[in-house]
Image (spheres, helix red, strand yellow):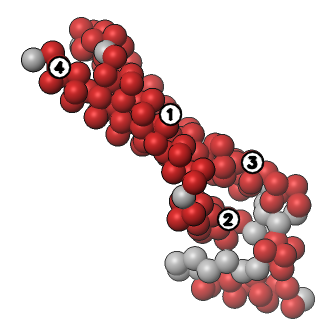
Amino acid sequence: MNFLVEFFLFWIGVLLGIWWFGSVFLPILYGFPRGLYWAFRGWAKWRAPFIYLVSPVLWSVALIVITLVLFIFTPKVATYLTQSRGFAIGQFVGIGLLIVRVLFSRSTHIDMADDFYAFMGSHLTPAGATMVGVLSTPGSSGSSQGTNTSQRQ
């Protein structure tokens, strides 16, 4: 029975590791520095990199709250999870899988760049729209027209 519980916790750990790394760590590691670079170059407004951090910060707060609730209301479950080798190894495997995918998968690079461009499209300065080009994002036809008219002035 213990093997089945650890096996199940291993897969929960893998999924949690992939989700945490993809939704919290990658935006901080990839999007924030790139947003700062764009702001330093004058391509994006200065608030854009910091707005990019809102989602990872909210997810981090949510995970902290979930952990606290788990420790307060079910301390035995929380203790078991902290001592579970399957859960810990699963998290490392999940993070490792996503790191390998980020480093070696071209489609992952394209997906991350597309997400970044979609977010930054509404935060471009006129210089950024000229240098980077008006980025096509869903529903941004109105904002790109405004950018084009400001370039003509």
Disc 4 residue type? Phe
Circle 1/circle 2 CB separation < 8 Å = no
Q: Mark 3 = which residue?
A: 33
Q: Earlier in the sequence, mark 3 or mark 2?
A: 3
Q: Earlier in the sequence, mark 3 or mark 4?
A: 4
C-alpha distance separating marks 1 and 2: 22 Å
Closer to the camera, 143 or 82? 82
Give the foreground label among 1 and 3. Answer: 3
Q: Earlier in the sequence, mark 4 or mark 1?
A: 4
64 left or right, relative to 8: right
Q: Mark 2 = which residue?
A: 120
Closer to the camera, 42 or 97? 97
Give the foreground label among 3 and 4. Answer: 4
C-alpha distance separating marks 3 and 4: 42 Å
Circle 1/circle 3 CB separation < 8 Å = no
Q: Quadrant of residue 150?
A: bottom right
Disc 2 residue type? Met
Q: Mark 4 = which residue?
A: 3
8 left or right, relative to 94: left
Report helix, strand or loop for mark 1. Answer: helix
